[in-house]
Amino acid sequence: MTAPLETTFEASDAERIGGIGGRIAVFLEPEGRMETLARRVNRLTRGALARLAESEAFKRMKPGEGHLLSFPSGLAAEAVLAVKLPKKPSAEEARRAGSAIAKFNGSVPLTVLLGGRAAMPDILTGLLLRAYSFDAYRKEDPEKPAPNRAVTLMVNDPEAAEAAAAPVRAVTEGVFFTRNLVSEPANVLTTVEFAERLKGLEAHGVEVEILDEAALEALGMRTLLAVARGSESPARVVVMQWKGGGDEAPFALIGKGVVFDTGGISIKPSAGMEEMTMDMGGAGVVAGTMKALALRKAKANVVGIVGLVENMPDGRAQRPGDVVKTMKGDTVEVINTDAEGRLVLADVMWYAQERFQPTGMVDLATLTGAIIIALGHENCGVFANDDGLAEGVLAAAKAEGEGAWRMPLGPAYDKKLKSRIADIANVGGRDAGSITAAQFLQRFVKNGTPWAHLDIAGVAYRKDDTDFAPKGATGWGVRTLDRLIRDRYER
């Protein structure tokens, strides 16, 4: 994968602007007002920015969009991007401005004339997120210039900017860790390799424990193990602890980590099955969040636990009609082996509560296609037994510009999960599929534990570019969870 952008801050110096080579990004307010650095660019280019500000093209631009000026006279730079942005933009407008600058970045050095803009952290967030690419398995094209990976940000106070940028860089590194994991092919990111990569978080101060199949059997995680039975890649559960909050009980993050999902004996159609490398997206988000918390030294106790399996159809694989027992002790009739994620989560959620007695718990999973039918690719589905936690998740997602929508729960849906021979069936039919999946999971939440289930099937992976990610893995959820923990659980 391409290395992240290297961003450095330099003190504002209007006199240097004319001699800066490469590319320059500058900001114009909707009314055409300019800060000192932009005014210098305007003078050197003999009023080019002022003429742009008066144009119909500029008036039609939305805040955060940019207009390209190629080979402007009076500057050594080969191009200038004039970004339309209010003096006090919304967070989303500032992030879109950063995204526009990332798209403007080419193969030559880039200088961003920020001056004293207070929106710098959000601009930097958009710039870093959109500059990501995953090309680990592509040869370099000798005829194509390498992309520029160094960006200079000219600001009034470099020391203050560095301090404000530190948490932004930490969280975006967490997002990139998630994107990298989700983008890896399943023959590389096996359950064992996934666990080893998470072990690497120890270098950042995270305590990491890997539970093998013998340990999982001893704990009674038989529904998780049943999913893994058909694969040569052994099941693993990885426990990651970040202890930044003293002696308080931790908040728990639980992730579904199906490194590849064929559907098992209830095999999926072949068309699109290659995308099932992303079925470990929930575990990827948990891992990325733990990295972000560690890098920014979050003052909270958080435990992240992921169940890593591969769902394959061989002679040992579980069958439709099998009955398996959960760690909790409930029996489950397996109606469809392609509804495997909830079997993994049930055991891991119960284990998290038994061992850590968390103050609250959020699980994330690419769980159902039904949530995509309901919400498309713009919002994740939020299910919760606690209004306060649900509102916290929704507020955090809104603040970070990550779409989320609350979905219902209710005992009436439990009737669809009745089994002829066991305590519960693992599916309840096509209608309300994402809700019945959440109802299944709620059975494994202890009384008094605030819990939210995030079905990220529609948002973890996109077939199209977005403002803040190229097509593929999005890393959705790392920023939301980091914000949730920062706002609600840090001391």
Image (cartoon, rainbow, N blue to C red):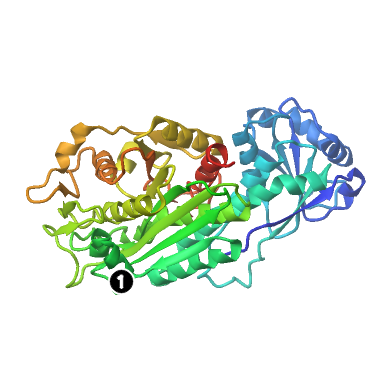
How many numbered tags mark residues here?
1
In the rendered view, tell whether residue 304 sits above or below residue 317: above
Q: Which residue is mark 1?
A: 214
Question: Residue 355: image x %, image y %?
Answer: 38, 54
Secondary structure found at label 1: helix
In the rendered view, tell whether residue 175 sits above or below residue 452: below
For label 1, count other residues whose C-alpha is less than 10 Å away and answer few (under 14), some (14-19) or many (20+): few
Question: Residue 149: image x %, image y %?
Answer: 68, 60
Pick the front one: 486 or 11: 486
Q: Quadrant of the N terminus?
A: bottom right
Question: Residue 393: image x %, image y %?
Answer: 46, 37
Question: Does any portion of residue 185 appear in the rendered image?
Answer: no
At label 1, which amino acid type do we have? Ala
Pick the front one: 485 or 118: 485
- Looking at the image, which residue is at 57% across and 53% down? 292
Residue 330 shown left or right of residue 279 in the figure: left
In the rendered view, tell whether residue 326 sits above or below residue 476: below
Q: Specify the farthest residue to the right.
A: 15
Q: Which image quarter: residue 139?
A: bottom right
Q: Quadrant of the C terminus?
A: top right
Residue 76 shown left or right of residue 452 in the figure: right
Q: Specify the farthest residue to the top.
A: 31
Question: Does any portion of residue 403 appear in the rendered image?
Answer: yes
